[in-house]
Image (tube, rainbow, N blue to C red):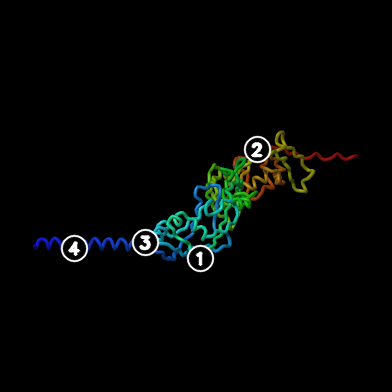
Amino acid sequence: MAAKKDKKKRFDVRTVILVTVITLLVWLLAESRTVRSQVSELSPRLTAGTTSELLMRPAPNFSWPEAFKVTLTGSTAGLDQVARSLQGQVPLRLGIEVPATPGVHEIDLREVLRRLEVIMAAGVGVVEVSPDRLRVEVDAVSTVSLPVRVISPDGVAFDGRGTPTAVPNTVRATGPAGVLARLQGAEALVTLDAATVAGLTPGELETVRLRAEVPDDPDRWMTVFDPEFVDVVLTLKSRTQSLVLGAMPVQVLVAPGEVGRWRITLQAGAQDLVGVEVTGPSDQIERLRSGEVVPTALISLGFDELERGVESKRAQIQGLPPGVQVSPGSDLNVRLTIRRAEPEATEP
């Protein structure tokens, strides 16, 4: 008899547990299907997806919100499913939520949310969105090539033709067509500053990597330049140079009181001074080379030299630019013959 009572007692406990579990499951099912409202904050996120021919951004002069409030209604399970799927963000995909055409588009966030697959599948309704409008700018991708121009400090000279030379000599800009339209006809500038030039070795071929600068634009969005840096190949001209002057006629100077008393003849081959080498600053040597400055050669004979009949005299080079000197080893000696002038015959 006692065994029967214990068996019945155990049966009653199992029945209670089973009924409790079933009741809990029914309550949970009912709770999950209970319609309720939920206010959430979501962040709009622009994504281009697989579209590579268009670019987009928040429209200029529009206050783009970091987040917006949305009131959703639906079952607890549906609301939980939406929250897990969105993870606090709403995608604005180019070609889906955002029209894939250039221009400024107004986006209705309420409609965007209502058409999201996750919201429709969960049976959730969109009650209110604040703010409910966004503005997005879309533009086509374009490319333009900019020639590179090298700017060097004033007064700096380079050896060789075509130096300094930028490698490559063009820069490609890729970005929105509206931005690149403002770059048409522009140049990319590479500036050799004085500090860079000071570090170069005159007379040696060198390569310097510098950033290519383009005209300023306060609204150059999503624009990239390739390459960003270019190599500048150059040879800095030596700060001092040498030059062999052309033939210079030799001029003879004597004191006014000696004029007519002596016959001074420059020996054959000595009428012109040739092969004279000068050295000095590069810019001043260039003045000689270009003919801007023309020096002269002269010899000055004093009374004693005339009396002794010197046979050679070192010439002086007059009119050289500042800092230019005759190089050591240049032969400046002029050979000459000096004789007294015959007195003029007088008539009886």
Vertical placement of residue 259 versus 74, above or below? above
Marks 4 and 1, the one that precedes in the sequence: 4
Residue 71 rendering spot, x and y as whole percentages: 46, 65
The disc labelled 2 sits on which kind of residue? Gly
- Image quarter hosting the N terminus: bottom left
Marks 2 and 4, the one that precedes in the sequence: 4
The disc labelled 4 sits on which kind of residue? Asp
**Residue tagged 1:** 130
Q: Nearer the viewer, mark 2 or mark 1?
A: 1
The disc labelled 3 sits on which kind of residue? Ser
Q: Nearer the viewer, mark 3 or mark 4?
A: 4
**Residue tagged 4:** 12
Q: The residue tagged with tag 2: helix, strand or loop? A: loop
Residue 123 rendering spot, x and y as whole percentages: 44, 58
**Residue tagged 2:** 275
Residue 17 occupies which quadrant of the picture? bottom left
Q: Do residues under tags 3 and 4 come within 8 Å of each other at their CB atoms? A: no
